[in-house]
Amino acid sequence: MYIHIGEDVLIRTKDLVAIIDKESVGSSINAEEFLQRDDASYTNLAKGVYKSVVITTDHIYYSPLASSTLKKRTRKLIV
């Protein structure tokens, strides 16, 4: 199954590791360090400010969609 995370990007649900809210990233030193690694490959899907961070097994996406929206989309796939 796939989940739409913004723009025209779909990711496989089995590759999904985490969906993190923007505020949570800003309040955690560990999360900031992880996202600022030099070897991290990332794509900013937001045309402006991102609302959530989607981490997969091989890529990091800055999504324009709220983490609550993405969470609802994953729940629909489970049911």
Image (cartoon, rainbow, N blue to C red):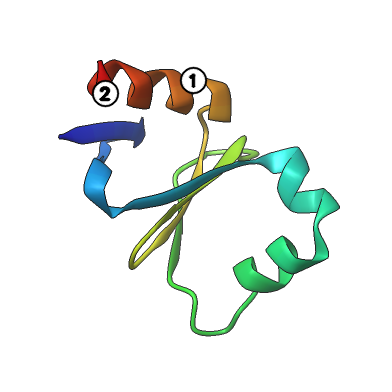
Q: Earlier in the sequence, mark 2 or mark 1?
A: 1
Three-letter code for the amino acid on which mark 1 is drawn: Thr
Determine which of the numbered discs, if any, sits on residue 78 in the image.
2
Q: Position of residue 65 (x, y in %)?
A: 51, 28
Q: Position of residue 76 (x, y in %)?
A: 29, 16
Confirm whether residue 77 shows in the render.
yes
Residue underneath mark 1 = 69
Determine which of the numbered discs, if any, sits on residue 19 in the image.
none
Q: Nearer the viewer, residue 66 or 13?
A: 13
Question: Crowding at label 1, few (<14), some or many (≥20) Cα neighbours within 10 Å?
Answer: few
Residue lying farthest to the bottom in this orientation: 38
Task: Residue 41: name its quadrant.
Answer: bottom left
Q: Position of residue 67 (x, y in %)?
A: 56, 30
Name the residue: 49% across, 84% down: 39
Name the residue: 77% across, 40% down: 23
Disc count in the image? 2
Name the residue: 30% across, 31% down: 4
Three-letter code for the amino acid on which mark 2 is drawn: Ile
Q: In the structure shown, which secondary structural element does the residue marked by tag 2 occupy? A: helix
Question: Crowding at label 2, few (<14), some or many (≥20) Cα neighbours within 10 Å?
Answer: few
Depicted 26 relative to depicted 50: above or below? below
The answer to whether mark 2 and mark 1 are in CB contact below 8 A is no
Q: Is residue 36 left or right of residue 7?
A: right
Q: Is residue 53 left or right of residue 75?
A: right
